[in-house]
Amino acid sequence: MVRSEKIKTAGYLISCASVALLGVSAWPGAEKAGLLPALLMGMAASILGMACRWYSYEIERRNKAGGGADRR
């Protein structure tokens, strides 16, 4: 059986790929309108947000496995 952590991780990786593909498709229009920095910052923020959520699941998983102590 597939563990939920693996499904969450796969979902976040797919979302990151989606952000990259959407960014690539929007690149020419953003470049012409002078909005390329905003596009890049938006892509980076989205991927960073997904990474933070994934990391929070990893912390929860480790806490469950390790008896509840928050290890940093």
Image (spheres, grey):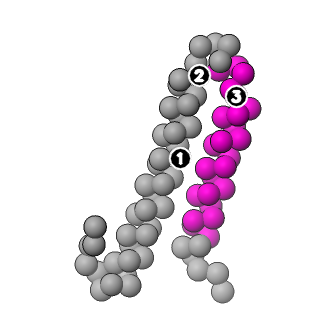
Please give the name of the residue rendered at 68% of the width and 26% of the height, measured from the top-left corner: 27
Q: Amino acid at mark 3?
A: Ala
Q: Main secondary structure of the magenta part?
A: helix
Residue 8 against residue 12 in the figure, above or below:
below
- Residue 30: name its quadrant: top right
Q: Of the residues under marks 1 and 3, which one precedes in the sequence?
A: 3
Q: Is residue 27 magenta?
A: yes
Please give the name of the residue rendered at 68% of the width and 47% of the height, measured from the top-left corner: 18
Residue marked by disc 2:
36
Q: Which corner quadrant holds the C terminus?
A: bottom left
Say whether residue 14 is left or right of residue 51.
right
Residue marked by disc 1:
47
Q: CA distance from mark 3 to mark 2?
A: 9 Å
Residue 10 against residue 31 in the figure, above or below:
below
Q: Of the residues under marks 2 and 1, which one precedes in the sequence?
A: 2
Residue marked by disc 3:
26
Residue 28 against residue 21 in the figure, above or below:
above
Location of residue 37 in the rendering, given as x and y in whole percent from the top left corner: 53, 23
Q: Amino acid at mark 2?
A: Leu
